[in-house]
């Protein structure tokens, strides 16, 4: 992006900046920049923002060391939002998460909590309760059935059916997880541990352990 600030639309002196990992393409955070912080970002090659709560500039990672090295910076077609692609050192979120957007499984989490409630209070009017009453073999039978239906839909390239069967498969997988008292957080942690290594390497390590 050229230093043509006149083409940008600052509202009350600020413009939102979407921060994206330049390799993995996931969104790390959203913050605000004013003209001065944008200028510092371009000059230093590291992200600088304007804190609306503290009403001052801040250098991302200045105290934590979790800096963001700017690779490319774009303005959108309307000039009212910036996209900053960065190399993130360690994590972006103050909570210790890689990204500030770690509630992506909110729908799945809500569904999981509903399934857990059905497990605790079995009801003849609940399909979920029927699965738990049938035991793990019955649950796994349904998982296999849904996996098969998903496979057929994907093979037939039927997008509408793929979406429908994916929802069914995820639901039954969540029932199986809930049966074994395995939380979504445990699955998320497992995925996070794998994110920094090659899938081939990870599979080899599993074979060695076994």
Image: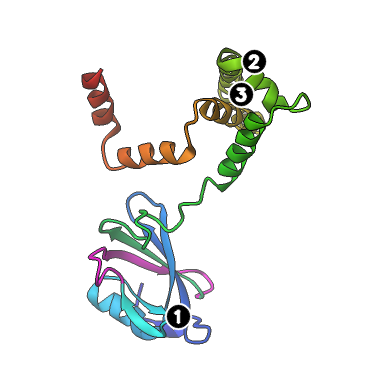
Residue 62: say if magenta. Answer: yes
Q: Position of residue 55 (x, y in %)?
A: 42, 85
| Residue depth check, mark 2 versus mark 3: number of the one nearer the observer | 2
Callout 2 crowding tier (Cα within 10 Å): few <14, some 14–19, many ≥20: few
Tell me the SS state at disc 3.
Answer: helix
Q: Look at the picture and state if 72 lies above or below 58.
A: above
Magenta stretch mostly in which secondary structure?
A: loop
The residue under the point 59% across, 18% down is: 139
The one of 153 and 166 positioned closer to us in this rendering: 166
Q: Earlier in the sequence, mark 2 or mark 1?
A: 1
* Image disc number at residue 53: 1
Quarter of the image where the C terminus is located: top left
- Which of the 4 image quadrants contains residue 157? top right
Write the start and end of the magenta stretch as one range. 60-79
Residue 47: say if magenta. Answer: no
* Image disc number at residue 134: 2
Tell me the SS state at disc 2.
Answer: helix
The one of 124 and 94 positioned closer to us in this rendering: 124
What residue is shown with label 3?
153
């Amino acid at each position: 992006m050229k230093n043509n600030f006149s083409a940008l639309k600052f509202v009350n002196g600020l413009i939102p900046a979407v921060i994206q990992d330049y390799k993995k393409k996931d969104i790390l955070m959203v913050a605000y920049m004013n003209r001065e912080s944008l200028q510092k970002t371009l000059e230093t090659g590291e992200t600088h923002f304007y804190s609306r709560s503290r009403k001052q500039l801040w250098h991302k990672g200045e105290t934590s060391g979790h800096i963001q090295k700017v690779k490319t910076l774009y303005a959108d077609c309307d000039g009212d939002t910036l996209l900053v692609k960065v190399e993130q050192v360690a994590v972006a979120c103050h909570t210790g998460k890689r990204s500030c957007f770690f509630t992506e499984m909110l729908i799945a989490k809500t569904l999981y909590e509903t399934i857990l409630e059905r497990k605790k209070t079995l009801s003849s009017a609940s399909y979920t309760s029927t699965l738990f009453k049938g035991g793990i073999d019955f649950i796994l039978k349904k998982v296999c059935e849904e996996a098969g239906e998903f496979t057929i839909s994907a093979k037939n390239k039927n997008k509408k059916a793929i979406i429908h069967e994916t929802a069914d498969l995820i639901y039954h997988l969540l029932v199986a997880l809930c049966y074994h008292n395995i939380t979504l957080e445990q699955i998320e942690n497992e995925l996070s541990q794998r994110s920094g290594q090659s899938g081939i390497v990870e599979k080899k390590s599993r074979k060695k352990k076994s």
